[in-house]
Each structure stands twice: as structure tokens, then as C-alpha cells.
Amino acid sequence: MNITPKVGFLPITWPGLYTAASETGEAWIQEEDTLRAQRALEAAPLEVVAHGRVVAEINEAFAAVDRFLGEDVDCMVIFVQTWNWADRILQAAQRFGRPIMLWAMPIARQWSIGGLAVTHGSMDEVGIPHKVTYGLPDQPGIVESIVRFARAAYVKNALTRARFGSIGGHGMGIYTGPIDPAQWLREFGVSVGYVDQYEVVAAGEQIPQDEIRRYYEETLKAEYGAVPPLDEVTTRSIRLYLALEQVIAREKFDFTGVNDMFALSDNYCTMCLAQSRLGVARLRHHVPQRFEWRAERVHPAPAQRRAAVHRRHKPRGQGVGHRPADRRRRGGDHAGAKPEGREAQLPAQAGGEGQRRLHRPDLQAGAHHAGADGARARQVCDAHHARRGD
């Protein structure tokens, strides 16, 4: 499923600038400036709905916003092209009621920084939520910040149309599990529905055995190869999954939570297979591949990133890679050998193994093993730091 956020692009100014000119006689509003911003968004992974001209009047702002709403955009980018009168846009922004990003470019002739400040402050004053970005389209991070904002807006708008299914009740006394449906609707726009676990069990028992066997042979075996035999437990697990799909379709749930322990697990079977298959089915159809886009210009080279990390985290007055003496380990490791070099500077972990704090989560897990795994963890750490050059 290819998900592309839809963005409304609205350039704004104030009425007198339609005909105004600078001291050199050059028109204050340059169409090329507007197109420069618009084309940058169109080149990004966004669907852009652009208003045809720079807006300065209230009625035209309303008309543009109504068009954006009619085309169901996820957010609106208000391009503050020059100084502007904020009162000409505020009511339309209120009517829009969806995420808004203010954007201005640092072009001295336009004095857009003044217009951006006025619009930003006015929206704050009347309580219109918005974000701000300031820079040229080819500056690092400018367009990508708008893309990230649009993606977040897409998700936010999707949630306002979503329905959550709570299947079963409060499990194992976990207080982080129960939700307040009124709060979810108020804060996220998510509707909540409730279904008892027995409904799923009853629906599953109505599924013919031939359908169970067909799913076992054509789906589970085909995908996993080695699977448990089709005994009573496996049969019930498949019944629960197929029944969950029926309930979700009937209730129009977009996502669900199931109380598995211990009512089902002790009296029927667990929901483990059912819930894992729900995840597989939805990831296969709903993960947006296009969200892998990144603007190359905003990502520094690995060496630059490493230097930036060191600069950001080094203690004041110390050079890159320096470790203060009071952090050095004292005493030997679990094998009785006195640590040397880099290992002598590291605090002890469980099992007596000196371990580093790693920046990579795939190495972090291996580095926390103690005992016999500690030596291997150190080798992994040393290889990682050698690649980093520190």
C-alpha cells in the first residue's frame, strides 16, 4: 500500500503588495519565489494541492481552505511569501482545523521573516496549533522537516477515523492495559468498541474443519515450512485467528487488543498464533514502502556524524575520546586478569565483564551478556569501535 501524504500549499501576502515594487522598481512579489517553494514540495514524496496565486484577502483564503478540505488534504503549508496581515488568514486557518506548517524563505527583498513572525505570533495568541520552518528549499533539513510533518499529519488524520477493538477485559492486573474510551476519542479521535472473548470462541467453533485444514496446509505450511501437527491445540489456534478476522470485519475495527491470559489460555487455547497472524496480514498490506525516502543532502557522512556525536557528548574542556581517570575500573575481571587499555576505563557489568555503552542496538544486546559470552561481546565491541575509528 503506497501512502503519500496530501499537502495543501497556500502562499500568502498583504493586499498592497500585489502592485508594490522595491526601490529598484522590481515587483515585490516574484512568481518564481512561489514556484521555487512549490516545486520543492512537488519533488518530495508528497501530493501537493496548490492554490493558484498568492492570497491576501479573507474570502480567497476561505475559498482555498474549502478546496483543501474538499480534497481531503492531511495538512496545510502556509507559505509566508512577504510581510502579511495575519487577520486575513486566521479565520481560514481556524476553519481548516488540521495540522498547519508556516514556511518562509530568507529573501531580504521580501522581508518574509517579519510576516512569518507576525503570523506565528498571531496564531499562538488565538490558539491555532502550528509548526514553523524557515529556510530555502535546498537548505539541509527544510523540505524533509515538512515531509516529516506531513507524515505525522497523515497518521493523526487516520487516527481520527480509526476504531479500536478491545476484546476481553483487564488481564493479569496490568494497569497500563485498560484505556479510557472517552479520553481516546477526545484526544486522538479514536472510537473504541468492546467484544467479549467468548464471541470469538463461538465464531471459531462454527468454522468448518475443511477450512481449518486448508489454512493449515496452504498458508501456515507454505509460509513456515516446519509447523506443529494439526492437533486440537493447533486447530483451536487457527479457529481463533479466522474468527478474529470475522469479528474485526463485522465491527470494522482498525486495530485491536486481546486479553489472552488466563481466561482463554487456561480454558481454550492462547491467542498467540491469532495475534501474530493478524500482524503479518496487516503489515503485508499496510506498511508504506515509500516512507523510506530520505533527502540525501540532510544526512552528513558517517565521519561527520561521529564527530558530531563526540562534540555533543564530550565533557566540557575535554578532548574527543578522553575518559576521566575517576571512571577507570579498579581490580580484575571475573577471570582474575587485570584489565588493560580501553577495558581498564570501563565500569563493571554483571558477571564482572567490562562493557561499553554502544550506539547500535543490534550490538547492545550482545554487549550485555556476561560470563562465557563476555569475551565474544568484547570482540564485537572492539570491532564496532574500530569501524567507528575511536
Image (cartoon, rainbow, N blue to C red):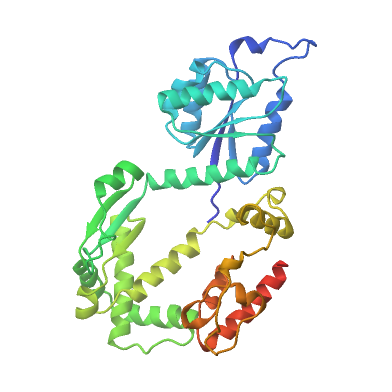
Whether residue 288 sits left or right of residue 190 in the image: it is right
Image coordinates for residue 58, horizontal then vertical, percent: 50, 16
- Camera-side residue of 152 and 305: 305
Q: Quadrant of the C terminus?
A: bottom right
The residue under the point 46% across, 88% down is 226
Whether residue 92 sits left or right of residue 337 in the image: it is left
Image coordinates for residue 68, horizontal then vertical, percent: 50, 31
Image coordinates for residue 86, horizontal then vertical, percent: 52, 18
Whether residue 228 sits left or right of residue 308 in the image: it is left
The residue under the point 69% across, 43% down is 140
Q: Is residue 69 above or below residue 161?
A: above
Kindly indicate the quadrant of the structure image that contains residue 358: bottom right
The residue under the point 24% across, 68% down is 200
Can residue 12 be seen from the camera position used here? no
The residue under the point 56% across, 68% down is 327
**How many numbered circles are shown?**
0
Image coordinates for residue 26, horizontal then vertical, percent: 77, 14
Q: Is residue 304 above or below residue 151?
A: below
Q: Is residue 211 above or below residue 99?
A: below
- Camera-side residue of 101 and 256: 101
Can residue 223 be seen from the camera position used here? yes
Whether residue 85 sits left or right of residue 81 in the image: it is left
